[in-house]
Amino acid sequence: MINSIDFNEIMAKKDARIAELEALVKYYEEIFRLSKSRMFAPKSEKKGPFQYTVFGDEEDDEEVIEQEPEPILETITYTRRKKRKGKRKDDLSRLPVEVVEHMLPDGSVCPECGDHLHEMGHNTRQEVMIIPAQVKMLEHVQSVYTCRNCEKNSADESVPFVKADMPAPLIKGSVASPSAVAYIMYQKYVMYAPIYRQEKDWERQGIFLSRQTMTNWINICAEEYLRPLYNRLRVILLQHKVLHADESPIQVLREPEKSATSKSYMWLYRTSGDTEQHIVFYEYQPSRSHDHPELFLRGFTGYLHADGYQGYHMLTGMIIVGCWSHLRRRFTDALKSMPKEDRANSVAQKALLHIAKLFHMESQWADLTPEERYTCRLEKSKPKAEAFFKWIGSLNILPKSATGKAINYALGQRVWLMNVYLDGRTEFSNNRIENSVRPYALGRRNWLFCNSVSGAYACAIIYTIIESARANGLNLFEYLKFLFSVVSNIKDGDIDTLLPWGDAVPEKCILPKPKLQERSARGA
């Protein structure tokens, strides 16, 4: 017979086990809802059911932040640039115009009286005409000259020969031209068309150019023609005081001492918004070790924006600035993992509301000078950020829940997240470089891998040139064609003139700024 003490102990263990299983079921439900949301729901954090206005109820706001004293009225001493609201307007003004006249034949007469007609005016309409890409063989014929007088009178039979000027071949012994290599690179690295697709497309036009030939052209031209610009961009990049960094996987099939399925990495570094001459730099490395950015950034002593990867926090000699967008993403995921009826007034919702207010203030200060932005942050934004961390630190949330993980991430990243308040040139998120990662990620989904290490290095060089040109508003195909036409004749001291902002870049390489069409009162 079981005594009362044993019975109570058994019931206590049973209750504890039930509570443990209920927590486990709740955890699995969160994972399921989050997985379902990632598969089917919109990916953007700025649109959809999880976007929260910064103008919430006063009662909800008081639960998140301690009561603040009434603000003192102040006079705004700076002027904000008036933003133009609108959308891109179709701009075809740079297209060449071909006029097609539609006229009656000579001697046309009036259908009423039979008298001769005369032209009194005309109507005009325009339409866009597409001419498919054309491929032709350009044959260079170099004339060779000699002297008739020397031919007749030379005693030693040595007759001088003079050759007409002719551009050197892009690749010796090859039919490659600047436009052909620029087109192949543009199709692969801008339009995400792998070489094997281009090979098939050329075949449909009756041209048989093997993928191996095109790959060789890309690798040779990247190393011989684009490498000097690549090295120069690295030197200029490290002279800046505010940078962004990120990394993305790349698969290299024939890499020494590694299997074909192992991961290598493309490390990215780029300038911040405090400069008008933007640089987006890609560097291939065989691993994700922090030794690679440590070596690349040697001598850099400024601010480096990065995500929560521990490898960045191990870097020395610089100040790491955390990304508030990554923090917002954690609480967004926590909210998505909840049942819909539990989302209102949840911790995740209140956290997102507070983070939205910080981002809203940043958007209001976007046109200020770094010094003005620094002052505004210290006076208005930093106290709210400190109150946010104090609030989430006081919560008692299960650490394995999605909200608990978001809170632990926030508290663990607090030191680096608060570094944004050290300088007005820093940014609240690392989204700038994530936007630079996107073209590479889209291309990788199509061409999948690099066959060799040399191909991976060429990939880094080409993406650096292309994305830096894109960031500076250039026509990418025209810029590549221009570089392949002139870079071999440029001396080392003049290499700066070929950079995306250089003086030697012709006008046809510069894209016009898109015109904005004002939206209607209802909005577009």
Image: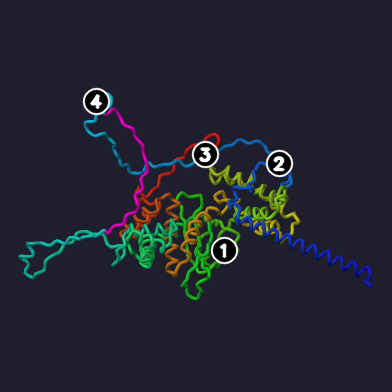
Q: Position of residue 154 (x, y in %)?
A: 7, 67
Looking at numbered disc 1 in the image, what kind of residue is underneath it?
Leu
The residue located at (53%, 59%) in the rendering is 245
Q: Position of residue 432 (x, y in %)?
A: 53, 53
CA distance separating discs 1 and 4: 91 Å
Question: Where on the picture, by quarter, is residue 106?
Answer: top left
- Tag 3 near tag 2, CB within 8 Å: no
- For mark 2, does the 10 Å Cα neighbourhood hold few (<14), some (14 to 19), or many (20 or more) residues? few
Mark 1 or mark 2, earlier in chain: 2
Looking at numbered disc 3 in the image, what kind of residue is underneath it?
Lys
Residue 34: assigned label = none
Mark 4 or mark 3, earlier in chain: 3
Residue furthest left as drawn: 153
- For mark 1, does the 10 Å Cα neighbourhood hold few (<14), some (14 to 19), or many (20 or more) residues? some
Q: Is residue 238 visible?
A: no
The residue where tag 1 is placed is 315
The residue where tag 3 is placed is 85
Q: Secondary structure at mark 4?
A: loop
Q: Position of residue 80 (x, y in %)?
A: 54, 38
Is the residue 130 above or below the residue 100 in the image?
A: below
Give the extent of the magenta segment. 119-137
Would residue 42 appear left or right of 216 to someone viewing this image? right
Looking at numbered disc 2 in the image, what kind of residue is underneath it?
Asp
Is the residue 100 above or below the residue 3 in the image?
A: above
Given this view, does label 1 or label 2 mark the residue nearer the observer? 2
The question of residue 185 being in magenta is answered with no
Residue 57: assigned label = 2
